[in-house]
Amino acid sequence: MSELRTRDVVESDLPAVLTIRGRSFGPLGSGGDTWWQRVSAETLGGRMIAVVDENDTILGAGRIRPFEQAWGGRHLRMGGVAGVYVEPSARGRGVATALTRALITRMGELGDVVSCLFPTTATLYRRSGFEVGGTQTRTTYAGHHLRSLGALGGRSGGDTTVRSATPDDAAALHALAREAQSRHAVSGPMLPSVARLAEELGGGELTSYVVDDGFVVYDLSEDALTVEQLVAGSPATAAALWGVVGSGSSAIPTVHTHLDPRDPVALALGGLPAAEVRQVPWMGRVIDLAAAVAGRGFAAPLVAEAELVVDDAEAPANAGAWHLEVRHGRGTATRTGDQAAGSALHVGARGLSALWCGWSVSRLRQAGLATGGTAAGDAALDAVFACTPYITEYF
C-alpha cells in the first residue's frame, strides 16, 4: 500500500480535484462552472487540502469554508467542511480518514473553534469526532395564511414600507441578521457575510425586499416559493414581509421556509404548517474547547460549574481535564491537569461535540459516549450547553 500524505491544494491541482469530484458525484450541472470558480477562490491558499500518494497523485480533497456561526446568540469562527471527494479507485485505503483529520488540524491552525458539515456518511465523520448536532428544516405553509399577515401589519402602525433590496443594502442586512441572532440567543445558524448577501442581492436568481428593521430573501420556482432568510425587528415588520411572501398565493399557493423551526411566524399564523416537514441532519465538532466556551453566549441568570475530562486525539486543544464555569452570560473552560478526577464526566471527541450541541448527558450515557461524573455535574453540564441548534443554509 502506498504511503499517504496531505498537502495544500494549489491552483494547478484544480483540474485533478474537479475530475475526482465528477467521478464521485457526477458532472457539474447548469451554473456549475461559476460555482466551482467561487468555492475554489474562497478556499485556495490554506482552506483546501489534498491527500496524495508517493507520486504526488491526488487521491482526495476537501475544503474548509470560512463561516461565522451563532451559539447562544454570540458568533464564533466556524469551519464548514465541504467538497470532500475521494477517487473511487482509492476508496478503502484510508484516504477520507486522513483527509478529515488533516482538515481538523488545519481548522485549529486557522483559528476556527467549531466545525460543521452535512455528512454523506456518518461513520466516516464519527471516526474523527463529529456528531449529529441538529437539522436543516424545511417547513411548508399555505401562502394564503401568510398573505393574511400582511393585512395585520398594515393595521399595526409604524413605517413598514417595503422596497426591493440592492447590493448596496448588504452591510445593513448583515447587521440586521447579526442583531436578530443575538436577540433570540439562537444556536447553530450561520451568519451570512456581507459579500454573500451582496452576491445574492445582485445575482438575479433570488428576490429580496427590505424594511428599516428587516428583510426577506426568497427563491421563486414554478410550483413553490422558498424563503431562504427572513429577519424582522418588530411584529409589524414581520407581518409586512410575510405579507409580501404570501401575496402571490393564488398563483403560488405553497411556501417553503428554511428558517428556525421555532420562528415566531408559527405563533402568528391563522393556520398550522403542513404536516410534512423535511429535515436534513448536520454534524458538529468542537475544535478548540477553551476558545469555543469563551466565545459562546449563555443565559445571564445562569451560574454553573462542572468538571469534564476529554479524550480527543485529533484536536489536542480539547484533550485533558477541564473546569467549566458560567457566570453573567459568559463562560470559561480552564485546564486542571487532573485527568483522573473522580467527579468529572469523561467524554471522547464525539461526546464533547454532542454535549456542545445540546444533547443531554443522560442521552450521551445511553449512547455510550459518556462515563463517570455525578448527578450534580450532569445537571450543571446540561444547563451550560442547553440549546436546540439548527442550520438554515445547506453548504
Image: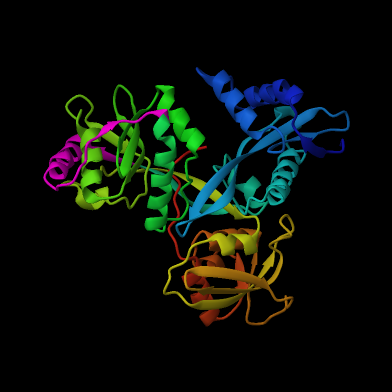
* Residue 147 location, quadrant: top left
Q: Is residue 368 above or below residue 12?
A: below
Q: Residue at x 55, y 20 (%)?
A: 34
Q: Is residue 125 magenta?
A: no
- Is residue 312 something one can see in this rendering? yes
Instruction: Where is residue 379? Give x, y as percent.
Output: 49, 76
- Is residue 28 something one can see in this rendering? no
Q: Is residue 49 above or below residue 269?
A: above
Left or right? Give the position of 100 relative to 118. Answer: right
Q: Residue at x 52, y 81 (%)?
A: 376
Instruction: Where is residue 206? Give x, y as percent.
Output: 38, 27
Instruction: Where is residue 390? Give x, y as percent.
Output: 44, 50
**Which segment did they paint magenta?**
139-167
Q: Is residue 364 above or below residue 246?
A: below
Instruction: Where is residue 260? Give x, y as percent.
Output: 37, 49
Looking at this view, is 58 or 324 the one in front?
324
The mark tally for this picture is 0
Looking at this view, is 339 or 174 the one in front?
174
Q: Residue at x 58, y 26 (%)?
A: 38
Q: Is residue 142 magenta?
A: yes
Q: Residue at x 48, y 53 (%)?
A: 70
In which quadrant is the N terminus drawn? top right
* Residue 305 location, quadrant: bottom right
Left or right? Give the position of 85 relative to 237. Answer: right
Tell me how the rendering is colored: rainbow
